[in-house]
Image (tube, grey):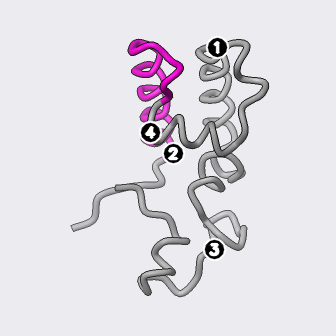
Amino acid sequence: MLVFNYYLFKIGRKESTACFCGFYSESVKHFFLKCPLFAASRHKLLSSVAQIFADRWACMSNTAIVSAFLSGCPSLSYDEDKGLFLLFQTFILDSNRFYVTE
């Protein structure tokens, strides 16, 4: 499970919601769409995703983009959805933001 500081603060596991970049709240949307620490990886991800969504990309809201990453997109074919998931997975792994602790 991907756990962000926003959630950890809500459950009393962090003293602040702040992101490592200094933004006041590390949320799902901030990490995937706004955090400057991951700008290069995000640009690569979103450029590839724009090709999958083609003409639908320009009218997609940030909420729809995050939802497609997290839940898939019913308007995509199985292969497109699988490609979207693999791109997203690569972004997460390349970010080195999440790791397993014992």
Q: Are marks 2 and 4 in contact (CB under 8 Å)?
A: no
What amino acid is found at the position of numbered circle 4 in the picture? Ser
- The residue located at (42%, 82%) in the rendering is 11
Rendered-image quadrant of the C terminus: bottom left
Image spot of residue 16 (x, y percent): 58, 82
Q: Which mark is residue 71?
A: 4
Mark 1 vs mark 3: in front = 1
Residues at marks 4 and 1, CA–CA distance in whole angstroms: 19 Å
What amino acid is found at the position of numbered circle 3 in the picture? Ala
Marks 2 and 3, the one that precedes in the sequence: 3
Marks 1 and 3, the one that precedes in the sequence: 3
- Residue underneath mark 3: 18
Q: Residue furthest left?
A: 102
Marks 4 and 3, the one that precedes in the sequence: 3
Please check the rendered image and state whether residue 77 is part of the magenta-colored stretch, yes or no.
yes
- Residue underneath mark 2: 95
Residues at marks 1 and 3, CA–CA distance in whole angstroms: 33 Å
The magenta span reads: 73-95
What amino acid is found at the position of numbered circle 2 in the picture? Ser
Marks 2 and 4, the one that precedes in the sequence: 4
Q: Are marks 1 and 3 in contact (CB under 8 Å)?
A: no
Q: Quarter-wise, where is residue 28 in the image?
A: bottom right
Q: Are there few (<14), some (14-19), or many (20+) residues within 10 Å of tag 3?
A: some
Q: Are there few (<14), some (14-19), or many (20+) residues within 10 Å of tag 1?
A: few
Give the side of residue 6 with respect to residue 51, left or right.
left
Give the side of residue 94 with respect to residue 34, left or right.
left
Please check the rendered image and state whether residue 75 is part of the magenta-colored stretch, yes or no.
yes
- Residue underneath mark 1: 51
Image spot of residue 35 (x, y percent): 68, 53
Q: Are marks 4 and 1 in contact (CB under 8 Å)?
A: no
Q: Nearer the viewer, residue 49 or 39?
A: 49
